[in-house]
Image (cartoon, rainbow, N blue to C red):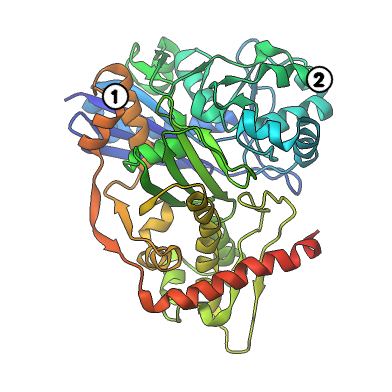
């Protein structure tokens, strides 16, 4: 039976999935890696570490399913967005990749907004400039590391580097490129007039393609390193958020994706090219040609819980934390948490924002702190969801994904705080599934992405409904949550 290989290059790990032509998950494998933080505000990773991790997952798949690896007919990608990979003339990596969590380019992002103007940035990029986005990071390299800058042959986004190692071909896709803050989102091509303005060579930017397009084929070198058969077609793939939307079946309006992983995201599909005039949230190109992803992000969602577990409570497991939180009442006894440990993206775009517990009393114990963190993450997602609805986007149902979807307590919190029905995908690795669907559609295994969604996407039987008796409690907590940031933001500097 023919198979498709989907690879999701995340922030904390890479995951690879073998999917058969009937949509059955044959096997998955994962390999973790760390984020390097050499200085406060810096966040980078080695692309070679990514490549080694990808090879390890493929070897694990080969060990578990030796015959199926030879049945692979297409390869697709999903990847962490915004990051900057710099390559030289021989394809060598020139420096560690500056990833989305990085804050070193804050000054460059602010300078872009002042020089270009918010109105023009909205029309061209549909987004503000933000530290951690590829173009502000490139401006930082130009200013701080001119020797590196002068040797750049091509810039890539993270998953593009892995695809290059597999095919030898350089390029990117519109969905990922639109997260760089240098793509003309409406035209789905680089904003060359802005590139010229900053005296950057145009030819270091790779060609922009659609996610389903074939990028190349598995090379003999890649076959030697991974065990994959040479000659398999490889599609460009997409950023992880559009891939996850496809893997969750959100290829029509009215469905919202909520993802709680290392960071947190909430996104909506839009057939229309729309953006928030105040640029409080993002509009990116969707992996589907001529569609768009309306996107909100909180930087420190699952990472907040991990910080609490490892640095404060020294707890044994996430399950232990979840059990503790379940023992206390909704609202965490009035304890509020701002999940801004690494600044905040939407809607505030504030790299200087900091995390905070507020309202502590003698009555509070570890259970309240855990619940407060979990609720604070959902409040942050609600900030963006409210803007979606102000823009006229429907939110008929929310599909929960990421590590947070494995916690029934967190799922119920989302239903109660967001005041929407929550359902959960039947497949845990939705971004991998989306990558597989893109590969299948791009190589003719599937007629279209939409057909792949109909055939391959399923949902668990359990759904989570908002509990009406908690509506006023959570609305009041959310009001205080919003007021807390507005009242203290100047003190965070």
Residue 233, horizontal then vertical, whole percent: 35, 15
Residue ID at (62%, 37%): 127
Provide the secondary structure element on which disc 1 rests. Answer: helix
Residue shown at 44%/62% (left/top)? 418
The mark that comes first in sequence, 2 or 1, is 2
Q: Which residue is mark 1?
A: 440
Q: Residues within 10 Å of mark 1 (few under 14, many from 20)?
A: many
- Relative placement, left or right, of 301 versus 269 is right
Which of the image's four quarters has the C terminus? bottom right
Mark 2, other Cα within 10 Å: few <14 / some 14–19 / many ≥20: few
**Residue extending furthest toward the bottom:** 362
Q: Nearer the viewer, residue 383 or 410?
A: 383
The residue where tag 2 is placed is: 147
Front residue of 389/350: it is: 389
Picture quadrant of residue 191 = top right
Q: CA distance from mark 2 to mark 1?
A: 42 Å
């Amino acid at each position: 039976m023919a198979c498709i290989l989907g690879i999701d290059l995340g922030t904390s790990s890479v995951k690879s999935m073998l999917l058969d032509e009937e949509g059955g998950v044959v096997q998955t494998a994962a390999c973790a890696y760390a984020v390097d933080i050499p200085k406060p505000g810096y966040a980078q990773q080695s692309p070679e570490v990514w490549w080694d991790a990808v090879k390890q997952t493929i070897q694990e798949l080969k060990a578990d399913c030796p015959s199926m690896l030879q049945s692979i007919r297409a390869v697709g990608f999903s990847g962490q967005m915004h990051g900057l990979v710099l390559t030289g003339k021989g394809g060598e990596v020139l420096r560690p990749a500056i990833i989305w969590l990085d804050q070193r380019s804050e000054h460059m992002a602010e300078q872009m907004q002042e020089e270009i103007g918010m109105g023009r940035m909205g029309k061209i990029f549909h987004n503000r400039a933000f530290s951690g986005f590829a173009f502000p990071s490139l401006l930082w390299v130009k200013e701080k590391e001119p020797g590196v800058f002068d040797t750049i042959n091509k810039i890539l986004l993270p998953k593009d580097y892995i695809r290059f190692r597999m095919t030898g071909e350089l390029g990117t896709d519109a969905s990922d490129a639109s997260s760089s803050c240098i793509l003309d989102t409406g035209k789905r091509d680089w904003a060359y007039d802005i590139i010229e303005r900053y005296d950057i060579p145009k030819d270091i930017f790779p060609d922009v393609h659609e996610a389903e397009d074939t990028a190349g084929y598995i090379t003999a070198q890649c076959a030697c390193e991974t065990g994959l058969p040479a000659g398999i077609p490889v599609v460009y793939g997409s950023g992880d958020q559009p891939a996850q939307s496809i893997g969750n079946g959100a290829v029509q309006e009215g469905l919202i994706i909520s993802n709680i992983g290392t960071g947190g995201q909430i996104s909506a599909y839009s057939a229309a090219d729309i953006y928030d005039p105040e640029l409080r949230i993002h509009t990116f190109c969707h992996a589907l040609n001529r569609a768009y992803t309306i996107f909100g992000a909180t930087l420190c969602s699952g990472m907040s819980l991990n910080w609490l577990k490892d640095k404060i409570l020294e707890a044994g497991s996430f399950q232990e934390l979840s059990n503790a939180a379940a023992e206390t009442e909704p609202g965490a006894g009035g304890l509020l948490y701002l999940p801004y440990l690494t600044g905040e993206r939407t809607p505030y775009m504030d790299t200087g924002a900091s995390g905070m517990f507020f309202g502590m009393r003698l009555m509070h114990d570890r259970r309240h702190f855990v619940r407060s963190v979990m609720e604070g993450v959902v409040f942050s997602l609600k900030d963006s969801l409210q803007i979606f609805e102000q823009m006229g986007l429907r939110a008929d149902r929310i599909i929960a994904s990421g590590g947070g979807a494995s916690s029934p307590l967190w799922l119920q919190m989302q239903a109660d705080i967001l005041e929407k029905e929550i359902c959960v995908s039947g497949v845990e690795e939705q971004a991998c599934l989306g990558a597989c669907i893109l590969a299948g559609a791009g190589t003719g295994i599937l007629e279209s992405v939409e057909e792949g969604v109909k055939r391959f996407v399923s949902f668990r039987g359990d759904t989570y409904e908002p509990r009406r008796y908690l509506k006023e409690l959570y609305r009041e907590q959310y009001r205080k949550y919003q007021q807390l940031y507005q009242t203290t933001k100047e003190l965070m500097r």
